């Protein structure tokens, strides 16, 4: 049983049972810039160090955030190249 998950306690036996996680609630954060990604990675790091997130899950989340950061870098470079090419055409 994890500390942060909802549980049900049987009134007769006192047994504790994990409840399924609530559906429809999604974690939302802005990941539109590298600074946003950096902040979210730092948050995951702090929560992992504090024991709020399992280290394996924290590693996976940081890996995904790293990939998001690479996509942002690629999009930014693509925009800059297009702007330079347009400037050269005129």
Image (cartoon, rainbow, N blue to C red):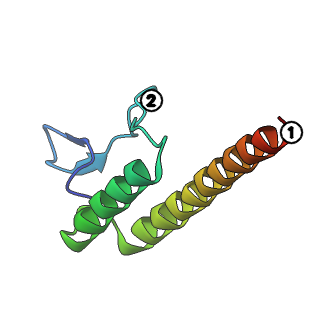
Residue drawn at x 68%, y 55% is 74
| Outermost right residue | 89
Residue mark closest to the camera, 2 vs 1 = 1
SS of the residue under disc 1:
helix
Residue drawn at x 16%, y 47% is 13
Residue identified by numbered label 2: 23
Instruction: Work out whether 19 lies above or below 73.
Output: above
Instruction: Work out whether 59 lies above or below 25.
Output: below
Q: Quadrant of the N terminus?
A: bottom left
| Outermost top residue | 24
Tell me the number on the disc at residue 89: 1
Picture quarter containing residue 28? top left
Residue closer to the observer: 61 or 77? 77
Picture quarter containing residue 21? top left
Q: Residues within 10 Å of mark 2 (few under 14, many from 20)?
A: few
Residue 26 is left or right of residue 14, and the answer is: right
Residue drawn at x 38%, y 32% is 22
Instruction: Work out whether 59 lies above or below 8.
Output: below
**Disc 2 to disc 1, C-alpha distance:** 52 Å
Residue 11 is left or right of residue 80, and the answer is: left
Q: Quadrant of the C terminus?
A: top right
Residue 36 is left or right of residue 87, and the answer is: left
- Residue 80 in the image: state x and y as whole percent: 67, 48
């Amino acid at each position: 049983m994890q500390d942060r998950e909802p549980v049900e306690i049987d009134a007769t036996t006192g047994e504790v049972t994990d409840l399924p996680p609530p559906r429809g609630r999604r974690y939302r954060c802005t990941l539109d810039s590298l600074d946003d990604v950096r902040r979210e990675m730092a948050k995951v790091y702090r929560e992992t160090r504090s024991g709020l997130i399992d280290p394996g899950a924290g590693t996976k989340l940081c890996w995904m955030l790293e990939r998001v950061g690479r996509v942002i870098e690629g999009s930014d470079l693509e925009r800059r190249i297009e702007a330079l090419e347009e400037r050269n055409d005129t």
